[in-house]
Structure formats: C-alpha cells, structure tokens
Amino acid sequence: MNEAGQGRDWRRRAARFEAALRAVLENTGAAILAALFLVVMAAVLQRYLFGGGFVWSDELAIWLNLALIAVAAPLAVTGTLAMRLDVLVRLLPAGPRRLAGVVAEAVAFHGALVLAAGGLSVATLVGGHSTVLGLPEALRFTAFACGGALTLAALFLRAGLERGLADAVASLLLGCGFYGLAQLSFDLFPTPSLVAALVAGAGLLLGAPLPFALIAGVSLTGPFGGLMPEPAIVQTMVGGVGKFLLLAIPFFLLAGEVLTEGGLAERLIRFAATLVGHRRAGLAQTALVASALFSGASGSSVANAAFGAKVMAPTLVARGYPPANAAAIVAGVSMLDNIIPPSIAFLILASATNLSVGALLVGGFVAGGVLTLALAIGIHLSVRGVVDAAPKASAAERGRALIGAVPAIGLGIVVVAGIRLGMVTVTEASALAVAYAVLACLALRSLNGRGVWAALRKSSAEAAAIGLLIGASAPFAFLLAVDRVSDEMAGLVTLLDAGPYAVTLLANLVLLVAGLFLDIGAAILLLAPLLLPVAVAAGLDPIQFGVVLVVNLMIHGLTPPLGILVYVVSGIMRVPAGAVFRAVLPLLGVLIVALMVLSLGMAAWPALAPGLKALF
C-alpha cells in the first residue's frame, strides 16, 4: 500500500475510533447525569415528604458532578462546545493558518497534560477518606486525571483527522515542550496573572479551546514566579466546581432538552402565534414571544438558538424571510434565555460573587422585559418586504393554545416562585424542574425512553463543557486575587473619586471589549469578582450591577468575532456567518439602547432610592 493509501486507511480507523469514543463518553455522561438526578431527587423527596434528609446525598451529588465533568471533558474540544475563537485564524493565508492551528492544538495538549499529570499527582499525595461517603478522597482527582488522558486522545484524533497525522504529532510534541517549559523557573514578572492572561489570550486568538487555554496560561506562570504548580491547579479546579449550587446547571439544561424532545416547546410557539401572529412581522414576533416563554424553562441561550434554527427558521424562510434575516432573528431572540429566569448565567454569577440567586432572578425578569420590548421594536422597524401576518386568533383559539402551553409555562413559574419564596434551594428547584418536565411529557404521551436518553446525552455534554470552563477559570481567578487586581481597581476608583455614572460607563466599556473575545461564562467568572467591588465602592446596587453585567455580555452572543449564537444558528441553517452578522445589526442596535436604559437606571438608583422609599 502506498503512502496515500496508508493515510486514508489511518483516517478511516481514526474516524471510527473517535466516533466510538464519543459515543462511549456521551452515554457514560448520560448515565452519570441520570444517577445525579436520582440522588438529588431522592434527597428532595426525603426532605419534603418525610421531614428529614440523607446525610450523604449532597456530597455524593457533588462527586457525581465532578465525575460528569471529567468524563465528558474530551467532548469540549470539538464542535460548538469547544469555545474556539478561530475567526481571526481563518483570515490568514494557508501557511500561517496551518502553523496557527498547530500551535493552538499544542496549547490544548498542554492544558490536557496539566489536567492529567496534576490530577494524578494530587491523587497520589492526598490521603484519607470522605467522612460521609467513606470513599478515598483521591478518587475525585483520579477522575480528572482520567479526563485529562482521554482529552489527550480526543485532541490527537481530532487534529489528525482535520489537519493530518504529521500536524497532530507536531502539536503533541510542541505541547509537551510547553509542558516542560512550565517546570522551569525564571522569576521575571512581578504579576503572574499578566503572564497567564497573555498566554491564554494568545492561545484563544490562535483557536485553542478556551478552558484549556486558561489552564495552559496558569501553568506557564510557574517559570515567572507563579504560585500554582500542577497539583494546585487541579485542586483549585475541583474546588471551583465542587459547589452544590452548580448542580442546578445540568438539571436546567436537562429540563430544557426534555421539553424540546417532548414537543412542549412547539406548543409554546403555537401559543405565541395566537398572541402576536396577526401583527406586522407576525412570524418574527412569534419567534420572539416563544423565545421569551421558552426562557422560563431552559436557561440556555445556545440550546434555544439550536432549537429555533431547527424549528422556527425554516418556517421564517418559507414565509419569505431571507435566510440570513431569519437566522438573525432566531439568534437575536435567543439571547433572552440567559436573562429571563431560570438563567444559567445568573447561577454562574452567583457562584463567582456570592450574590443572592433569588434577587438576581427577579432582576432578570425586569431586564428580560426591557430587552423583549426592545427586540419587538427592532423587529417591527427592521422587517421589510415580508407579508406574513396571520388572521387574528379568536379568544377560544388563544384559550386552547394556552391550555396546551400551560405545562411548559408552568415549569418556569414553579421554579422561580419556589426559589424566591424560599420553599426550595436552587438545586432542588432545578431537580424538580426535570421531574416536572418528564412527568408532563409522559402524561401527554409525547416522550418515550429513547427521547429521555437523547436529552440526557445532549445535556450531559453541555453541562460538562460549562463545568470545565468554570473549573478552568478558578485557578485564573486565584491568580488575579493573589495579585490584588480587584483592590487596585477599587483604589483607582477611590483616587479618581468616580461616581456611579462614571463607574457604570467604564464597567460597560470594559465588558463590551472583553465580551468580544471571551465566552460569557469565562467573562463572568473572571471579571465579575473584579468589577463588583468597584461598583459597590461607587454606591451601585450589587444585584442591579450583576444583571447589567450579564445583559452586556449576552449581547456579545451576536457580535463578531465570537458571536456564539450567530455561529450556532448559521451552522445549523448553513448560512454564511458574515451575512448573519450583518443582518443582526438592527437588533444589536436596539439591544445596546436597552443596555443604556438599564445602565442609566442603575446609576440613578442610589440618588432615587431614598426618595422612593420615603414615598412608599
């Protein structure tokens, strides 16, 4: 067999092995997520039905979540879950683009090596057993070591299939070189966090997966006076994701997937059509209202964007909307899911800043209402040359559609009311949301076992990618704390005597720039702990500031070069992303106006609050 034939044979075998590995990891992740749900749900039933609780349930649930993140970590190096910023690399000529790809994969290999070696090192050093579970503490870190090793294999297969075996080997060797460099010591930089930021930023711009770029950046601070060797990095990662609150993320994702698989999301669309389908740009307005309603059940903008691209976008195109405009509408309205509760973005913010989840969710309703109104105006003004208004629905038709949509609408109401009234914790509410969604779909006979398993597979991969990002951001945030970056920023505000309006403007500018290059989760985890003390020092309300921060960053789901919502929709619809970015500009404009309204309201609140309290 000649060299070309051997290459094709290797690619076929590698493709089969990668598909098999992905299937095993997805099914294992689904099984772990199912077990996690059963543990938390059993604890909820024990607490509220029998007046007690299981001593072991919370810790076992946290351990299962760690296992889920570790097992599905290799899935976060391919597809949309990889969080790769490769837009700039695509503009390069063939030769430099190939070199950038090799270096980007090398950065990812370095991050995976840190995960594998660091996890193994901690596992061998840590002794003792869990006092509650009786299991060796080393198991938690062994899981991450295995996840790192599997990620190395997944990275090599992906690089070999996409770039060729020679480039894959070159990336692996270069990654090992980076790993070896991290073991040296130069002690040149007084601020290791700056080194981490430069390395992670370079890796991100070259197209490396964001979580592994962050891990590699922290690792390479070692030669420059950094205080985080590999074991410390992995320990900090495990601590970053080992919070009971974060268990709500996989459950809210699962609830949204169950509703989609069970067809309840389509009932929301039918109900929305009876409300606004008769108006100008009625189908686009229907997509907006349906997205706002679905936000109360999903909490994930990416999931809503994918659903809208599959269900709403083809109908929009069939009614005469240009494909790029249809994609822009779907992407634009999908940003509401991380604003209107339950919101995964607010859960991440609460875990990073210790703000009240319930208060953030209430603020999300207010912001969601403002943004929904802004998008409705933007759609009304921007849609031209399309006559898609349906006959006005009668009261009876609206009533029937409402009855059909009640199971999906009720989920969001039950979750938010339960959390806000203090009846259940956020994690318990998210588990109840899954149970509610499954029972509702089964009662309506719209879901079977195969659909439940498909929802488990999809949501487990998404939850693991988010969890890995949270874990990778923890060591980076630790370096920022050690270098006292937040104190320096707060001191600067005090020195300049900046008031609430100046701080609001500066914070929004920082977020608008950072959001161009950072995923919303990473931006929240890295910037919220820095900016929140500054905002509080200027007299701003921390909850209001948190809501404005999330709104600001969610707008970047529609902006180049990252624009994750645009890429998800354009990828599914097979429409050029550049055309969608141009088509979404009118919606982007009204969203920025809405951000200004919310920001001005926040800045004016310290002066208005005393008078309003005196009146009421």
Image (cartoon, rainbow, N blue to C red):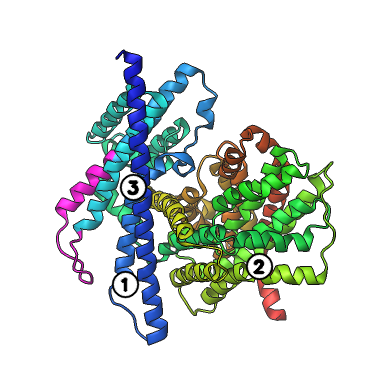
Residue 453 occupies which quadrant of the picture?
bottom left
**Residue nearest the viewer, comparing 4 with 322:** 4
Q: How many labels does the image show?
A: 3
Relative horizontal placement of residue 261, taking residue 381 as reference (left or right) = left
Q: What element carries label 1?
A: helix
Q: What residue is shown at x 37% (from left), y 46% (from top)?
A: 23
Q: In which quarter of the image is the C terminus?
A: bottom right
Residue carrying label 3: 24
Q: Which is more foreground, mark 3 or mark 1?
A: 3
Please give the range of residues in magenta.
113-137
Proximity of marks 2 and 3: CB atoms separated by less than 8 Å? no
Separation (CA) of disc 2 from disc 1: 34 Å
Quadrant of the rendered image containing residue 338 = bottom right
Q: Work out whether mark 2 precedes mark 3 in sequence or the reverse, and give the earlier one.
A: 3
x and y percentages locating residue 155 in the rendered image: 35, 35
Per the rendering, the mark at residue 405 is 2
Residue at mark 2 to residue at mark 3: CA–CA distance? 36 Å
